[in-house]
Image (cartoon, grey):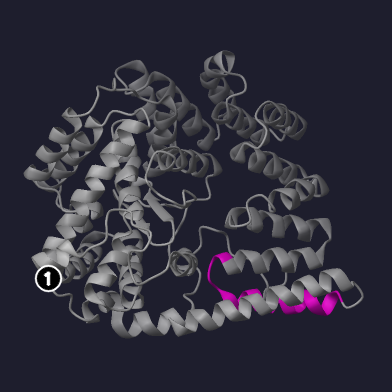
Amino acid sequence: MTDPQTTLPHPSDKLPLLHGFRTALTALGIGLLLAATPITASTESEEIRLPKLGDSTSGLVSRTREKELGQMWLRIFRSQVRTSSDALLQQYVEKTVKGLAEYSPLEDKHIDVVVVNNETMNAFAVPGGIMGVHTGLFLFAKNEDQFASVIAHELGHLSQRHYARSLEAQRNSTIPTLAGMLGALVIAATAGGDAGLAAITATQAAALDSQLRFSRKNEQEADRVGIETLAKSGRDPNAAGEMFEQMLKATRYYRRPPEFLLTHPVTEKRIADAKLRSQRMADVPPSDSRDFHLMRARIRLATEPTPQQAIKRFQAELDGISDNDDAARYGLALAQIAAGKPDTALDTLQPLLDNEPSKAAFVLARTDIDLMREDYTSATGRLQHALDRNPGDHALTMGLANAHFKAGNYLAAERILAKYSRVRKKDPSVWYLLAETHGLAGDIVGVHEARAEYYILNGVFDKALQHLRHGIRMTKNDYQTHAILEQRMKEVIKMQEKAKEL
């Protein structure tokens, strides 16, 4: 595990951009969308010929091709953007997206979710079932229904196949559109400040200039479908208008508006339309979710300059007024753990554990205290007990594997992760920890195999092939493993060739 040529970067580290996309995006920059064939504004007759909402025949791009392009897009996006490795947060967002997708008109309700470590308010959907959420969305939304309204809107774009339909309208290829989207979203997630704002504004301005009416139609459809999805899922449809209002306020009181508004312009009319549409639906009592506020506390902790400042903020909320008292207590305990105060943190956390001893968020916080005290037996025992009561829980599974890893129980961690990697084949964090665990458990072939999968998911095919070749050389006397690795290498070579075509 110490070979400098095969050191595995942490999931939060930015990886080198895939060569094929590097060439394209360097030459064209984020203005790739600007260089695309101009989109002709739709005439009335063209709008009439558009397919019906959700029509499975819409677009020049097949659903299979969309899926393939979406997966490639996601790999390259991950290679450039700092994504979250917080299993608890990832699980929450995935659960929310899945819950909403069940009530949306999407034909394929499987969505791959990527959580971006960025304080800006943004969310996006990419053809092929990709959903991206910036952690900053939690900071702007006041409750879970508002948070869900943004996700429901993006699901609306996917369900109506707006990307494929726009291609049909302009009779253009899909690549410039997806490449332009990649460039803009990478800048939104990495550059920040005025540079990112200017770049995205330029890209969006070009799109709006040539396709204004069609773009508005898309937004209206996504609003309609999103609000209907919210209501069907048992959430307050009024949350969509409320969230739009908060976004519009951001343009008035902040120097830099949320990135979401640059691709989804919000006007007073749009807010009024959303409110009117919500009023026509059956009343759904406003609800809130404590889980949303717990996740929000985790993100707020990460945005504070120091754990000590986070302690002051959460303590003030706990002593005064907070959006959710349990979340304020939870955030305070996490901040105290981050500040290296396990005893104080346990005192703060204990009331939450007394009420819900098996809740994953609280168990994981309690385990962090065990690990800080190097009480590995208690940590692994506590997590195993919670996992027995919540089988399949992603955060608890990763927490247990990590606790065994820190305890030096590499074989136990390896067994958990090897089995789990078959369940979450497309999760880079699982393969990352599995590679490290294989190495310390002495399974060098496993190291190369897990590292290859990690690099594949991050679009770094050269390194993936390098590890597969190492594994192939080491398994000459193991026919089955040798054959599996050779087949995987052929698949990666095809991926690499397709990526270069883009």
Q: Secondary structure at mark 1?
A: loop
From this viewpoint, is residue 326 visible? yes
Q: Position of residue 461 (x, y in %)?
A: 58, 76
Residue displayed at 28% across by 65% down:
165
Front residue of this view, candidates 70 and 307 = 70
Residue under label 1: 41
- Count numbered badges in the picture: 1
Q: Position of residue 374 (x, y in %)?
A: 71, 35
Instruction: Identify whether 422 is placed above or below 384.
Output: below
Quarter assignment of residue 32: bottom left
Residue 380 as seen in the image, left or right of residue 34: right
Instruction: Identify whether 336 is placed above or below 412.
Output: above
Q: Position of residue 37 (x, y in %)?
A: 22, 81
Magenta region includes residue 459: yes
Which is the main secondary structure of the residues drawn in magenta? helix
Front residue of this view, candidates 152 and 391 = 152
Magenta region includes residue 287: no
Q: Position of residue 363 (x, y in %)?
A: 61, 28
Residue displayed at 74% across by 35% down:
376
Q: Quadrant of the C terminus?
A: bottom left
Magenta residue span: 457-475
Residue displayed at 26% across by 38% down:
227
Instruction: Identify whether 430 is placed above or below 402.
Output: below
* Tag 1: amino acid: Ala
Instruction: Identify whether 190 is placed above or below 348.
Output: below
Residue 319 as seen in the image, left or right of residue 210: right
Residue 245 as seen in the image, left or right of residue 340: left
